[in-house]
Image: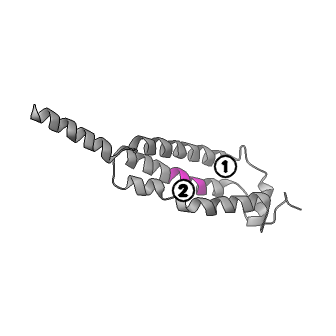
């Protein structure tokens, strides 16, 4: 009887040690899938803005932004999802790693889309 309770205590402590493992794996997995889909769309040039908006930053196609999206969003999220699923000790820091960079990323996207500090064809 004592061994059965020990097994239950061990399984309960294992569950409490990784309470958000499935959430981390799911969110990071969906982020990785979205990053891959976005990368493919950018590289293929489908569903993108005209290439003329990239001339102000010296680009002639959406390939480099697509590769950048894959390298900075899809690949790290896929690694984080796998590590979270495997209960690696590196999963929580890797899942939270991009969070401090989100405000600066949003600011850069806002500047690019509105044209503050950037010259492109959408802003006179």
Graded by Cα atoms within 10 Å as few (under 14), some (14 to 19) or many (20 or more), the crowding at tag 1 reads: many
The residue depicted at 76 percent of the width and 50 percent of the height is: 49
- How far is disc 1 from disc 2 in space, using C-alphas? 13 Å
Q: Which mark is residue 92?
A: none
Query: Would you say residue 64 sits in the magenta stretch?
Result: no
Residue 55 on image: x %, y %: 78, 62
Q: Residue furthest top?
A: 1
Quadrant showing the N terminus: top left
The residue depicted at 54 percent of the width and 46 percent of the height is: 31
Location of residue 89 (image quadrant): bottom left
Which element type, helix, strand or loop, lies under badge 1? helix
Chief SS of the magenta region = helix
Q: Residue furthest right?
A: 124
Label 2, on which residue?
71
Label 1, on which residue?
42
The residue depicted at 69 percent of the width and 54 percent of the height is: 62
Residue 116 on image: x %, y %: 78, 65
Start-end of magenta stretch: 68-75
Q: Residue furthest bottom?
A: 117
Pick whichever of labels 1 and 2 is earlier in the sequence.
Answer: 1
């Amino acid at each position: 009887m004592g061994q059965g309770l020990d097994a239950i205590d061990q399984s309960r402590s294992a569950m409490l040690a990784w309470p958000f493992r499935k959430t981390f794996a799911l969110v990071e997995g969906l982020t990785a899938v979205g990053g891959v889909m976005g990368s493919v769309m950018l590289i293929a040039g489908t569903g993108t803005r005209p290439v003329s908006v990239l001339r102000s930053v010296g680009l002639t196609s959406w390939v480099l932004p697509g590769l950048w999206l894959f390298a900075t969003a899809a690949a790290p999220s896929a690694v984080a999802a796998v590590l979270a699923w495997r209960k690696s000790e590196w999963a929580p820091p890797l899942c939270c790693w991009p969070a401090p960079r989100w405000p600066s990323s949003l600011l850069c996207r806002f500047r690019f889309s509105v044209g503050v500090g950037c010259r492109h064809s959408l802003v006179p």
